[in-house]
Every structure is written in structure tokens, then in C-alpha cells.
Amino acid sequence: MKPGTNILPLLLDNVSFEIEGMRLIKDLCCTFEAGPRTVIIGPNGAGKSLFLRLCHGLLSPNTGTIRWAGPGGVDPVAAQAMVFQRPVMLRRSVAANVDFALKLRGYEKLDRAAIIDEVLSRCGLRRLKDNPARVLSFGEQQKLALARVWALKPQVLFLDEPTASLDPAATHAVEEIVHAIHDEGTRIIMTTHDLGQARRLADEIIFLHRGRMLERAPSETFFTAPKNDLAQAFVKGELLWWKLGKDNRRAKGHKRGGRPQRRN
């Protein structure tokens, strides 16, 4: 990366997002600097995927701002990428899927061939390079999706539940690829429902609940001594569907934990 071309930090200032009047993301304020792997966790419906889509630029906030505040010199759209839970495979071979992405970025043919060979080898897909991408197993497709973005050397990579529904062997392979991409300098921001995976991959944790960021802490600190009461319950494996949490209680007549008091 050339000096002065980093798109980071990424700044979110009072970001909210709503659909049909229902606020799903609420007053998010945070900054992502270069460096650590951030893993976003929380119960289903917490807003994890929406958070990533807002950061990536697929969605626009209703209020607040999201901006790449680096020194400039590079297009933020071209310098970041996202891999989804269900990756989109082109109707082409494995190698041609990677080649298509590189061609769009203006790489010369000879350069593309060398890059394709390298990333497919590192992702364990070189022997499948001529196979149709759409007949690969789900785990192989996810590895191909990672190979495709790895070839582009993004500064920031968003990963939305990249191992959901994968077996342990495929999950391990994907995690190893994520480690390798991070080791080459790419900033990782990902979501997961798997607390074991969060422990394995995260340098820091963001805990979301009902669209609010209730805690952000180094991974070791979060898993040993979370400060927020809902985060404590989540780490213990408790169900949070009825809990409001001490930071979210607005209605009168709620005991600690969020259950309404009965009136005589």
C-alpha cells in the first residue's frame, strides 16, 4: 500500500436505520482503525448484518453519517469488500470467477493468471480451477468467495456469518483463510453467531442488542468480564428475548431483567 492511500479510519456518527418506521439500528457511534480483527456478536435480530451492510455501503442510514476518513488517494469502494453468508457464484469456472473480479479492476492478463494460481492454491482450490463454480460444495464456494476478494487485496474485508451451516472441517478451512488475509494487512470486520469462533478469531468484540451497541471491548476482557448485564447473560448462553437490560429500560414498572411487575 502506498503512503497516504489508506481509507481508514471508518467513522460512524449517530447512525440509525429504519424500515417502515421501525428503527433497526439505533444511534451507533464508533470508529474502526487499522489493525485488530473485530467480531460483532449478539442474538438473532440484533442488527449484525445490517451493521455490516451500512458500513460496506449497501445501505444508507436514515440519520447520521458513515465516512471513510483516511488521507485519500484511493477509492473507498474499490479498497473494501464483503463476503456474504450465501456467496454469489458466477456461471463460470472457479478460475474464471477470480479472473472476472481482477479484470474489472484493470489487471493485465498475465498478472491475473499468476494471482489466480496463487490465491486458489492458498485456498485449497487449485485442483478445482476448471470446475463450474456453481457445482462446488457450500464450503468450497465460501472458500472461492474469499479467494476472489483476497486476489483484490482489500484494505477492509467485511464478513457476514462466513461459516454459517458449514461443518467443522470447512469452518476450520475458512478461519485459516481469514487468518491469512488478516496477516497480510487486511482489516477484518465480521459477524458470527458462534461464540467459539468469536473467541478464536476476534481481537475485539462488539456486542449488539436490538440495534444498539451495548459493549465494545478486547476479546479477552469481554469473554472473562463483560460489563453490560445483557452481554453477561449472552456469554452465559441465556435467552435474551424478554430481557431489556439496564441500559435499555424505559418503561416504568420493570424489574431488573426486564419482566414487567404485576399490578394488583
Image (cartoon, rainbow, N blue to C red):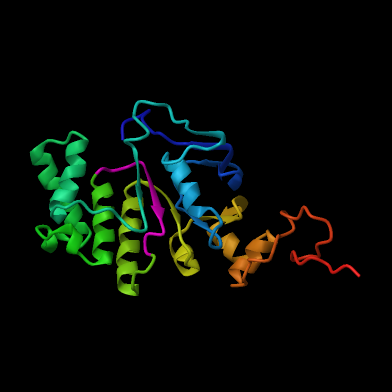
Whether residue 240 appears in magenta in the rendering, the answer is: no
Whether residue 159 appears in magenta in the rendering, the answer is: yes
- Which residue of the protein is positioned furthest toward the right in this rendering? 264
- Which residue of the protein is positioned furthest toward the front in this rendering? 20
Query: Which residue is pictured at 56% across the width and 44% down the height?
Result: 20
* Relative image position of residue 37 (x, y in whole percent): 45, 52
Relative placement, left or right, of 148 versus 117 is right
Query: Which residue is pictured at 13% across the width and 49% down the height?
Result: 96
Q: Between residue 39 and residue 63, name the one nearer to us.
A: 63
Q: Between residue 200 and residue 103, name the one nearer to us.
A: 103
Q: Is residue 151 above or below residue 75?
A: below
* Relative image position of residue 15 (x, y in whole percent): 57, 39
Say which quarter of the image contains residue 174: bottom left
* Relative image position of residue 161 (x, y in whole percent): 41, 59
Which region is colored magenta? 152-163
Say which quarter of the image contains residue 14: top right
Query: Which residue is pictured at 37% across the width and 59% down the height?
Result: 162
Q: Is residue 111 above or below residue 145?
A: above
Query: Which residue is pictured at 27% across the width and 54% down the height?
Result: 145
Q: Is residue 190 above or below residue 79?
A: below
- The answer to whether one can see residue 154 in this image is yes
Relative placement, left or right, of 7 versus 207 is left
* Relative image position of residue 240 (x, y in whole percent): 63, 66
- The answer to whether one can see residue 225 in this image is no
Q: Quadrant of the C terminus?
A: bottom right
